[in-house]
Amino acid sequence: MELSSPLTLEMLGQPFLLEKRISLLHAIEEQGSISKAAKAVPMSYKSAWEAVDTMNSLSSEPIVCRETGGKDGGGTTITAYGKQLLENYAMLKREHTHFLKRLSELTDIQSGTFKTIERLSLQISARNQMRAKVVSVVCEDLNAKIHLELKSGQVLVSVITKEAVENLHIEKDQYVTVIFKSSAVLLSEVSDEKFEENRLEGIVEKIDTDLENAKVLIDIGSHDKIVSVISKEILENMKMEAGNPVWVSIKENNIMLGK
Amino acid sequence: MELSSPLTLEMLGQPFLLEKRISLLHAIEEQGSISKAAKAVPMSYKSAWEAVDTMNSLSSEPIVCRETGGKDGGGTTITAYGKQLLENYAMLKREHTHFLKRLSELTDIQSGTFKTIERLSLQISARNQMRAKVVSVVCEDLNAKIHLELKSGQVLVSVITKEAVENLHIEKDQYVTVIFKSSAVLLSEVSDEKFEENRLEGIVEKIDTDLENAKVLIDIGSHDKIVSVISKEILENMKMEAGNPVWVSIKENNIMLGK
DNA sequence: TATCGTTATATAGTTTAAAACATAAGGACC
DNA sequence: GGTCCTTATGTTTTAAACTATATAACGATA
């Protein structure tokens, strides 16, 4: 049993971007002309031209640049704006596909075993969310300890209930999302033994302070960043500055996983 | 700019449940016959009959029961299984709609301002997830304190970054999902002053123990349940039993919000 | 100026899905 | 047996979407 659901972006009530049109635009990008693109997709030149025309007129900025005449008879190219649009659609589509896949996996509509779904499409307040690979899953009776490898190669450990592991079908070598609140991130200038759980090394990138708290942005490598909110007092005791190395620590219990 | 995306459930590669067919089934449920339902939807009798027939033959169990002849010429009724299917589809659709709505809200494909989306469709390991109404939002410079009212009327307070509040567009009177780990839930037999943050009253419903830990299920009223995982030691000091009243406490910092 | 491959536009043909219409056949009930 | 309203199953019509085809305009280039 599968879920399918074509994604359509509407504009002023009119269909604007759809699967077919997107692939046409990609073909135009490759071929440099509507007529060649139409053959490649394939579809009739007329449909292709009309699709391009309606898209262009629905859009506030032109998506393609059409030129008639000239050495090769002219041609059509995608504008920078159009390329941006293609990228953005791809991102939307990626999210949508992921959602459908998760929903399919969780669903057995015949037996109705999917009653246990919590909200599946949640945007969460936790500021720290990053991809990681599951290195190992060690189950005890109630809890499970999961070793995770970040993009940078640094390792994190998360403790969640065994129930959650089963519910999310977390297994070795899979990719999951590591989630933790910025208030759960402890900082230290030195590799302090006091903070023994989940120690990561990073570089301070930016510090914002208000009357009581400080928000510290830390680069832990490979484009992963961590946000930490700590009290201003602690920060001041640490003489921390942008560019300095810093040690991060997060309690195993404060790390959640998402899929 | 709107996103639209009709949800289709496929079976053996064939379309099985779609919007149109679902509304037909609902009409049949009301009218008691295919012909009347077809008029109500509206669609031609033949299309309606064929839709019903293909659904029935794709399904492992019959969805409708068709009878010809008799006093009123027969009729068609939805089976219990069919009704279950309708409910399940409605749930899928609800999730899907919610997802699309969130995605729309976060997206401005023209300007490309939606680059900041984290994974939007995440299933999270946190065992405790429940709906709550936002009573108030008090922003400081970096953090915000949010008062939430559960179904039972009990109140929780969550502290998250102001950034998160803006990102999720959390406002008074909205409904959000409260999220916290079962390991963040502290228990006490008495209304202990020591656990001052987010104290809720509930009744112990079930206790599971392993060698080290204990998982306690607590009913806090209005069908909301909380799972707590605590060390076995603490549990044993508390002489806790199913049916007993219990006090729950969760640190404000450990409560996340989702939307 | 003639050439060429393109955009731009119109019109005729083709395919496809649905509606509309027509007609059996079923079976309780009078 | 006739009535009645339904399910079940064709055939025909209609409408929409798309394809195919034809043709004008364009403008750099030889």
Image (tube, coloured by chain):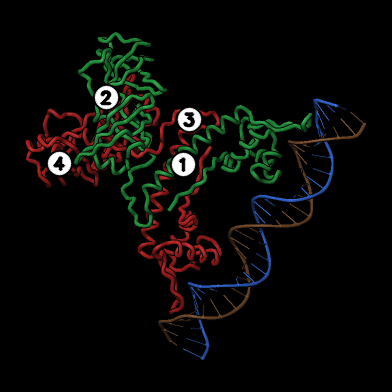
Chain colours: A green, B red, C brown, D blue
Residue corresponding to mark 3: B114
- Labels 4 and 1 positioned on one and the same chain: no
CA neighbours of label 1 inside 10 A, class few (<14), some (14 to 19), many (20+): some
Query: Looking at the image, which is closer to me, D27 or B196?
Result: D27
Residue corresponding to mark 2: A198
- Kindly tell me whether residue B259 is visible in this rendering: no
Which residue appears at 32% of the width and 34% of the height? A257
Q: Of label 3 and label 4, which has the lower sequence position?
A: 3
CA neighbours of label 4 inside 10 A, class few (<14), some (14 to 19), many (20+): few
Residue corresponding to mark 4: B210
- Kindly tell me whether residue A208 is visible in this rendering: yes
Q: Of label 2 and label 1, which has the lower sequence position?
A: 1
Going by the numbered disc 1, the residue's amino acid type is Thr
* Residue A243 position in % (x across, y down): 37, 11
Label 3 – label 4 distance at C-alpha: 45 Å
Residue corresponding to mark 1: A97
Single out the residue that lies furthest toward the top: A239
Kindly identify which chain the residue marked by label 4 belongs to. B
